[in-house]
Image (cartoon, rainbow, N blue to C red):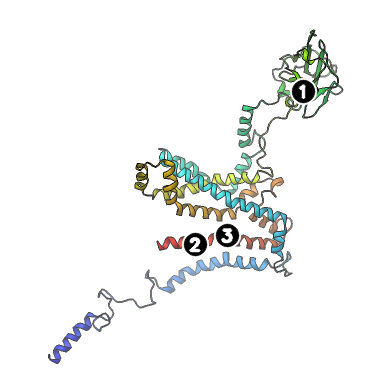
């Protein structure tokens, strides 16, 4: 072969190779210049351009996040004045203080209960609303509390949990249910007339000093009866003596305007109807009766030789419901208000995940004979597991920082029982005993509690990206 032929073949082969002279500056397929390594990123953005755009955000992040964290760690090593170095003394004091230990216990309750209940309710709402025609309206109503600030929600629930049934919705409902199954006392707060036969006998009741005999009449005067309890009451009547039985009258021994005689039934004095009267002998009730509309009662001959007793149930104070904001129930009550706000958030996220569940899997399970509970437990929940993890982790981070609801809802008498770490941080740093060193130590400890949850969340995000 001639030299010219060889040169021509070499030139052709060189053009066909990416590194040859004919292919210089082109890609493997000859469609354009090859990118120089390091000049551009995959997105086509130059590195310095990305840095310029990110710099303001990085400066703001450093000023608002990084610097406060570093300064808090530094400040936690000094005393309240900031001049004396105490090392880890503030951390030791934090765990030895009873109030802070209570806050830590309450935070554990919050982290375990609030996210779990909110997520469970959100899951139930999301699944059930798929079966009803007005599901969208229901979701809107459940999600609506998210539009309310924590401060406003705290004020709302402070009123909801008010002890007085005429103001607090929770106790209004509770009292209505209680009074449906339990008769209220007819004359709460009433008591015997001074220097009468009746004496306190325990349990809020009153018993006569002497025994009664058949054929006798026993008058039992009372005072301190509320005017509201006398509406429609008739005038008291003197009971007639009857052989073989014990009779008497229970009435309000008080004449409006004065002029009445103590222990005597005057013309306009009111009868106390509906009171239970018991004959007690040897600690046992041998006979009982209820006063009529005119205040009279009649006990059978078995009452002979017994003492008469007006049980404490006649005078028990009116039922005012549950002390929701007392030391025992204040934390569950506040958690309930949190669930009211955040169950809608959980429902919306879970409903979005539920929309991506393949319906053919659910239908196939039903065709194979699985019940709705089995479909829910074995198919729906496992497929929604990633979404449920997102919701639980998000709510856990949120409740670790809870402050507003506790500060607004809990009254002063129960604030120590409802204390949480974020509230204790505020009180230690800016309360009556200002100690910024201790407050900074609590802030650092709270950050350390949040970091593991954030780490789990970041790992989950990375796994999702790899998929």
Q: Residues within 10 Å of mark 2 (few under 14, many from 20)?
A: few
- Where is residue 455? Give x, y as percent: 52, 62
Q: Earlier in the sequence, mark 1 or mark 3?
A: 1
Q: Nearer the viewer, mark 1 or mark 3?
A: 1
Which residue is drawn at the image coordinates 39% and 48% (left, top)? 355
Residue position marked by numbered label 3 in the rendering: 450
Q: Which mark is residue 284?
A: 1
Q: Is residue 173 above or below residue 245?
A: below
Which residue is drawn at the image coordinates 60% and 48% (left, top)? 151
Residue 136 seen anywhere in this rendered image of the structure:
no
- Where is residue 244? Give x, y as percent: 79, 9
Q: Earlier in the sequence, mark 2 or mark 1?
A: 1
Viewed as shown, does residue 29 lie left or right of 248?
Answer: left
Q: Is residue 427 above or below residue 53?
A: above
Q: Residues within 10 Å of mark 3 (few under 14, many from 20)?
A: some
CA distance for labels 2 and 1: 72 Å
Residue position marked by numbered label 2 in the rendering: 458
Residue furthest left as drawn: 1
CA distance for labels 1 and 3: 63 Å
Which residue is drawn at the image coordinates 16% and 86% (left, top)? 8
The answer to which image quadrant residue 280 occupies is: top right
Q: Nearer the viewer, residue 409 or 183?
A: 183
């Amino acid at each position: 072969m001639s030299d010219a032929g060889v040169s021509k073949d070499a030139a052709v082969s060189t053009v066909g190779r990416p590194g040859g002279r004919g292919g210089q500056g082109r890609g493997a397929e000859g469609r354009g210049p090859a990118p120089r390594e390091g000049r551009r990123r995959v997105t086509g953005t130059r590195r310095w351009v990305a840095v310029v755009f990110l710099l303001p955000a990085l400066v703001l992040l450093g000023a608002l996040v990084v610097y406060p964290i570093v300064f808090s760690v530094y400040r936690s090593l000094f005393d309240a004045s900031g001049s004396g170095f105490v090392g880890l003394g503030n951390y030791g004091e934090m765990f030895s203080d009873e109030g802070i230990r209570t806050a830590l216990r309450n935070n554990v309750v919050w982290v375990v209960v609030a996210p779990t209940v909110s997520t469970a309710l959100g899951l139930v709402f999301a699944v059930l609303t798929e079966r009803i025609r007005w599901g969208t309206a229901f979701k809107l109503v459940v999600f609506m509390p998210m539009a309310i600030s924590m401060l406003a929600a705290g004020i709302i629930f402070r009123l909801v949990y008010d002890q007085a049934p005429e103001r607090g919705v929770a106790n209004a409902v509770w009292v209505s249910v209680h009074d449906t199954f339990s008769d209220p006392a007819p004359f709460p707060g009433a008591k015997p007339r001074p220097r009468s036969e009746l004496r306190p006998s325990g349990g809020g009741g009153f018993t006569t000093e002497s025994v009664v005999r058949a054929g006798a009449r026993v008058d039992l005067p009372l005072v301190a009866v509320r005017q509201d309890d006398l509406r429609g009451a008739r005038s008291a009547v003197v009971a007639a003596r009857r052989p073989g039985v014990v009779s008497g009258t229970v009435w309000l021994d008080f004449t409006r305007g004065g002029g009445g005689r103590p222990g005597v039934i005057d013309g306009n004095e009111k009868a106390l109807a509906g009171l239970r009267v018991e004959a007690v002998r040897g600690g046992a009730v041998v006979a009982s009766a209820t006063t009529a509309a005119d205040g009279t009662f009649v006990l059978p001959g078995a009452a002979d030789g017994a003492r008469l007793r007006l049980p404490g149930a006649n005078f028990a104070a009116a039922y005012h419901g549950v002390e929701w904001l007392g030391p025992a129930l204040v934390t569950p009550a506040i958690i309930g208000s949190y669930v009211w706000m955040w169950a809608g958030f959980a429902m919306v996220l879970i409903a979005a995940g539920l929309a991506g569940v393949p319906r053919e899997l659910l239908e196939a399970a039903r065709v194979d004979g699985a019940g709705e509970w089995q479909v829910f437990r074995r198919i729906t929940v496992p497929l929604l597991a990633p979404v449920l993890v997102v919701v639980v982790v998000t709510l856990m981070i949120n409740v670790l920082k809870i402050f507003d609801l506790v500060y607004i809802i809990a009254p002063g008498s129960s604030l120590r029982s409802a204390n949480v770490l974020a509230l204790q941080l505020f009180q230690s740093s800016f309360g009556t005993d200002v100690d910024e060193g201790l407050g900074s130590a609590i802030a650092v400890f709270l950050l350390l509690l949040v970091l593991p949850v954030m780490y789990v969340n970041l790992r989950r995000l990375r796994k999702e990206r790899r998929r």
